[in-house]
Image (tube, rainbow, N blue to C red):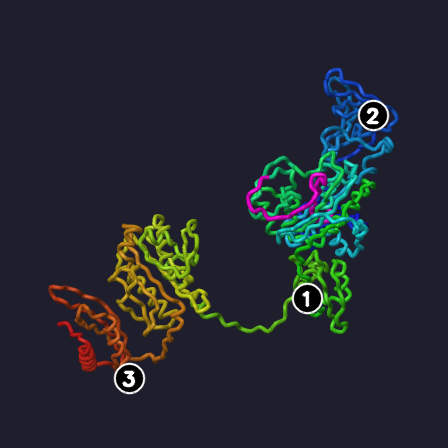
Amino acid sequence: MLISLNWIKDYVDLSGIEVDELVKRFGLSTAEVEGVEYKGKELENIVVAEILTVENHPNSDHLHILTVDDGSGAPVQVVCGAPNVRVGLKTYFARVGGNVNGLKIKPAKLAGVDSYGMCCGGNELGIESDTSGIVELDASLPVGKDIKEILPVDDVLIEVDNKSLTNRPDLWGHYGIAREFATIFKRELKPIEREDLTQYASLAPLDIKVETDKCYRYCGLTVDNVKAKVSTPLMKLRLNYCGMRDINLLADMTNYLMLEMGQPMHAFDNSVVKGITVIEADKNLDMETLEHEVHTIESGAVVICDDHREPVAIAGVKGGLKSGISEDTTSLLLESACFDCVAIRKTSRKIGLITDASLRYEKSLDPEMCATAIERLIYLLRQVDKDIKVTSSLTDVYKYHYPKHIIDIDTDFLSRRGGVNLSLAEVKDTLVRLGFEVSVLDEEKESLRVAVPSYRGTKDISIKEDLVEEIFRMYGYDNIKSKPMSMPLQPVDQIPTHTVEYEIKYALASQFDLNEVHSYIWNYVEYNKSVGIEEQSVLHLLDSSKSGQGGLRSHLAPTIIKFVDDNKNKYPDLGIFEIGRVVDNIDENNLAVEKKKLAIVLASEKDSEKTLYFRLKEIVEYIARHIMHISVDYSLTNQNKLYHPVNSCEITAGDLVLGEMGVLHPAIAKNIDKRKTFAVLELDVNKMLEVKKNVFRLTPTSKFQSVSVDFNFVADKNMPYGEIEKALSDFKASYILEHSLKDIYKNDEVLKDKISYTINFVITPKDKTLESSDIEKFSTRLIKSMETIGLTLRA
């Protein structure tokens, strides 16, 4: 949005303040400034001149040879192509040596005739939009007077970033910006001049009906005997400088007021529109706008209709051609309204028509501004056309009032939030300048009661912290000195889950060379079906057609399998893991019960299923022993169809099932990649935290030599090794014992239905050197102990 500094100065005296300081302070306290443009610098030596003679050019059918009086003494010959040249016309003339927005004026020969200057059109000077000819000036202006003495063409335009004004509907007009400058530099803000419309209260009201809650307020007034058609040069100049084009007096008036106050308005031809009905369209409607473009208004949009319920405007967006102002219009029906911001935005985007009006309505405008805007427009119109006649009372349909916000605040709260001690008087002065109503609640406690003005209450100011921002942005954030905070330094206990997660991730990445991924909590429904994974979702999405994700997952492993599948062609061997969230239940409040799980998938072209399987077991043992400090067991009762029916197991700790691991089911593996083998692990992190930690006891190191002895025990092939391991762990002796599985031997011809396990024992005496007789006694006791569970010593 472009802001004219000259326009701002109509409301606040900024004399003595440099432009750079104005821009800097405004940028620090109010909104982001994207740029500054100095207008008028490239308009030099342009004066009022009177045309003395007009002759047709002998070598052209559209050029004329003029002599003009530019006040320099002698008449000046100039060639001009404008169709409106005539003797006696006064216009802007650029002398030789002058500058017209970068065009240096030099003597020239046009179609064989010498020309010493340039008669200027308004669009060439940048002061109006008309391209039909040269500027026609008031005949009373003296010849030779510089344009800069007639119009304030020297101006500074400040370009403000629209995004930084999204929450400030009051700043979408020059008067709101002027209020900010007045507060920043502690200058007086002049009241905006308006016409008192209460004098017309006895006139008949208009027929205005509002049949939708999306129209918060609608004000209307009719005016007759409008004879003026052309806007003032100043109005044209300001409209063009601020990025709008001048059209005619009435259209320019409504645009001018929108740029001034931020309130969009519309003028209907009262000879066409006698009454107003505001509705929500119940079907698609076609309407031709003022730009001769036909737009389809979709059902549900807010539409302004005439007294015959025919659409005459798209509410908050654009007026219709049928009811538009023409050259013959002498009577007006003025509209000033406020609509639901969401409704206007939806309509604007659906029909692809974004206007200056719709951009403002989208920001939640203040309904209180509606009547004020009409009062201001009537005042401005009367300055141009004194004989206008108001023919109705101000008709006001006010359907929705924003809630009023009253906030109590004290200087202690401000100092704690802002870090600066401000006096009660300084706080009150800032708020009053910004338009807040302030009363003192308690002088001793320095507390205030603040009533938020309506133009700040639609979406911006509602709590005490908002007032803190208002006060300190005006105080100047750059004036707040940084200082270290004083607080007790105390150690903070880490959340166990976070610590465990980090240690597991670090170990998997650094010690086992696995790659971590991050995924969403949704199931890849389509993918799971394509490879044969049966995965149930606790909650389902209504529409998953675009993403392929259709519900909250109850297991993490299928997601990691998909990631492996996505990367299978890039790497021959791959290991991926994630600690992520799953949902396996709904609580009594119908809320999802989330859990943290660890999933690992290994894939390889060269390693066997057995290798991958035992690598997963190694990972489980490491996590259990070195990170969780727990003991785990393995049960061959895994029923999950994701895994191989034989080569898989549940991971348990006592009666608690912590997870499962195994080779991927052959049917699923075949659908993913026939060349690779896959192994999968999924552990419940929350359950692992519930397991009782192992108790470690320190044993003094023996000074006597250890002895290593191997035992070959034969067991039934259906006996789980876990039973053997438990029996070995429970075996007690007066020595320090360590045992490990050294080898497994299978041979149906020799052992039939048996398996031979080689168990290595390291025996360390506590108080003497071991003799052969001690080892024999130990061996005898161990063999008899193992026989109780069905093991025999292999000969």
Q: Residues within 10 Å of mark 3 (few under 14, many from 20)?
A: few
Q: Nearer the viewer, residue 679 or 1?
A: 1
Residue type at numbered disc 2: Ile
Q: Nearer the viewer, residue 616 or 682?
A: 682
Name the residue that disc number 2 marks. 51
Chain-order first, disc 1 or disc 2:
2
CB within 8 Å, label 3 to label 2: no
Q: Nearer the viewer, residue 107 or 537?
A: 537
Badge nearest the viewer, 1 or 3: 1
Q: Residues within 10 Å of mark 2 (few under 14, many from 20)?
A: many
Q: What percent of the width, then of the height, locates residue 151?
A: 80, 38
Most distant residue in the top direction? 58
Residue 118 position by quadrant: top right
Please tell me how many numbered marks the rendered image carries: 3
Name the residue that disc number 1 marks. 419
Is residue 509 positioned above or below 324 on the image?
Answer: below
Residue beneath the point at 53% across and 73% down = 491
Q: Residues within 10 Å of mark 1 (few under 14, many from 20)?
A: some
User: Image check: 388 left or right of 474?
Assistant: right
Name the residue that disc number 3 marks. 767
Badge nearest the viewer, 3 or 2: 2
Separation of marks 1 and 3 at Cα, in angstroms: 71 Å
User: Looking at the image, can residue 251 be seen?
Assistant: no
Q: What percent of the width, then of the height, locates residue 97?
A: 79, 29
Residue type at numbered disc 1: Gly
Q: Secondary structure at mark 2?
A: strand
User: Image check: 197 left or right of 285?
Assistant: right
Q: Secondary structure at mark 3?
A: loop
Q: Give the residues drawn in magenta, as a range.
A: 259-286
Is residue 389 positioned above or below 656 on the image?
Answer: above
